[in-house]
Image: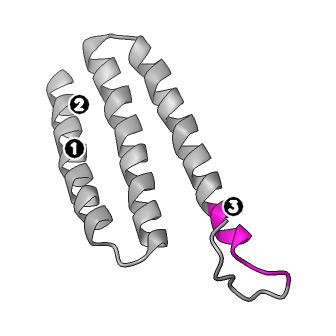
Amino acid sequence: MTEFLTAAVGLILALLALGLVSILRGPTDAERMMAAQLIGTGGIAVLLLLGTVTGVPASVDVALILALLATFASIAFVKKGLSRLNSDGAVSTEDN
């Protein structure tokens, strides 16, 4: 079973490398944020699988912290986008 989980970790890491390419090539900020969320989710999966394979329970705690950080990053991204909107829905040209 550990061989299967290790292979799954390798596959997820390969997909995370593709996500990094997407961050670098993404034409819009929203696409880059989605790729960053993909990397966060993949990182959580890798940490949980490695914790299961190696028997290190602290990796679950690190995965939970990474999940919290990814959530806060999404909230900050949305708040930044909403702060650019005026009350009439037009996009503001000022950076806040």
Question: Given the image, on which type of amino acid does mark 2 rest?
Answer: Leu
Q: Earlier in the sequence, mark 2 or mark 3?
A: 2
Task: Determine the secondary structure under disc 2.
Answer: helix
The residue beneath circle 1 is: 13
Q: Left or right of 15: which side holds 42?
A: right
Task: Determine the secondary structure under disc 1.
Answer: helix
Residues under labels 1 and 2: Cα distance?
12 Å
Where 34 falls versus 47 (above or below)? below
Location of residue 78 by image quarter = bottom right
The residue beneath circle 2 is: 5
Residue drawn 14% across and 27% down?
3
Location of residue 52 by image quarter = top left
**Label 3 Cα crowd, 10 Å radius (few <14 / some 14-19 / many 20+):** few
The residue beneath circle 3 is: 79
Question: Given the image, on which type of amino acid does mark 3 rest?
Answer: Lys
The span shown in magenta is 78-87
Do the residues under discs 1 and 3 have CB atoms within 8 angstroms? no
Task: Determine the secondary structure under disc 3.
Answer: helix
**Label 1 Cα crowd, 10 Å radius (few <14 / some 14-19 / many 20+):** some
Estimate the x, y position of residue 54 in percent, counting from the top left. 26, 14
> Mark 1 or mark 2: which is in front?
1
